Image: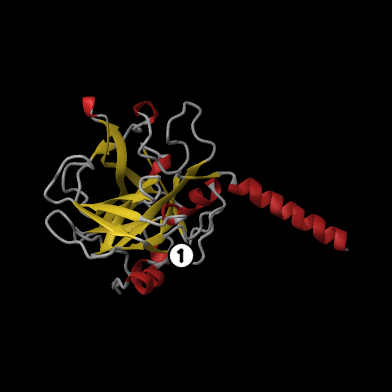
Amino acid sequence: MKTVIALTLILVVAAQATFWRKIRPLQPYRESIRASDVYLKNGREAAPPGLFPFLVHISVNNGRKLFSGSLIKEDKVLTSAQCCSGGRIFHILVGANNHVDDEPSHQLVRSTKCTIHESYNPFSLENDICIIHLDFPVKGKGIETIRLPSHSQVSECCFVGWAATVSGFRLAQKGADGMWAAPFYSNVSITENQTCRLAYPVDTSTIFCAKGLSGVCDEDAGNPLTITECDGVQTQIGIASFGPHPPPVDGSCGRTDYPDGYVRLSATLDWMQRVAGVPIRP
């Protein structure tokens, strides 16, 4: 009997390992990356100034990792747990259209404190969410916070079929000036939950999928996914978390034959309210 139980456990673990190999965490980019390593996926567009006033650029441990995130409160930044994991010092750039030019709206804030979701699983990427606590609040022209989902939007089917936008800082080539980071965005559509479950072994109560002309790239972890609600206000409903494995054979950074995985923010409303002190709509 013990032998049967042990064999069953081995088979279950092996099956789970096979399933999770379908998921590819979105690795960070580094400031030392070469221009030839940068690939801007088709369908991704440069964002005009002011389009995403909530978008922030995050440098972890003095540039060892670079990510994006969103300002959800004047002193709170929302991003992925992948971004925060192993982080000791965070430098957050807000109000920026790139990280090179000296813009009036630029503010650089330091932080040494973050809160990773206590149930974060680095293998399955469940609860891939983190809040960075800034040393001081940021405000000013060109800087805004992003609205979070409401309690009435917790249903798994709530956003299926909606048009959405994923945005984030990406490395780009600026002529003779070399590399720079600037905001880019891509339009996607929220897929059916069944489509997401067929592509990945995920719990769609906490994770959902989206698909568009451009797949997420390795350095897109933490990128906010937003929709525009009927009142005309942008609402962040997800955080870019993972893409399909293996990556494309041509070496590009995203695939379009599979959807990409996002943290479902409506499943973490109580956690965000408790950790960040952000009020949540009914």
Foreground residue among 32 and 126: 32
The image position of residue 198, as x and y in percent, is: 55, 48
Q: Which residue is mark 1?
A: 117
Q: Is residue 32 above or below residue 59?
A: above
Tell me the quadrant of the picture where the N terminus can be found: bottom right
Q: Is residue 203 above or below residue 269?
A: above
Q: Is residue 44 left or right of residue 14?
A: left
Residue ID at (37%, 71%): 275
Tell me the quadrant of the picture where the C terminus can be found: bottom left
The part of the image, by quadrant, that contains residue 47 is: top left
The part of the image, by quadrant, that contains residue 157 is: bottom left
Residue ID at (43%, 30%): 252
Q: Is residue 120 visible?
A: yes
The image position of residue 199, as x and y in percent, is: 53, 46
Q: Which colour scheme appears in the figure? A: secondary structure
Foreground residue among 218 and 87: 87
The image position of residue 227, as x and y in percent, is: 28, 54
Residue type at mark 1 is His
Q: Is residue 79 left or right of residue 128?
A: left
Q: Is residue 216 visible?
A: no
Residue ID at (31%, 34%): 43
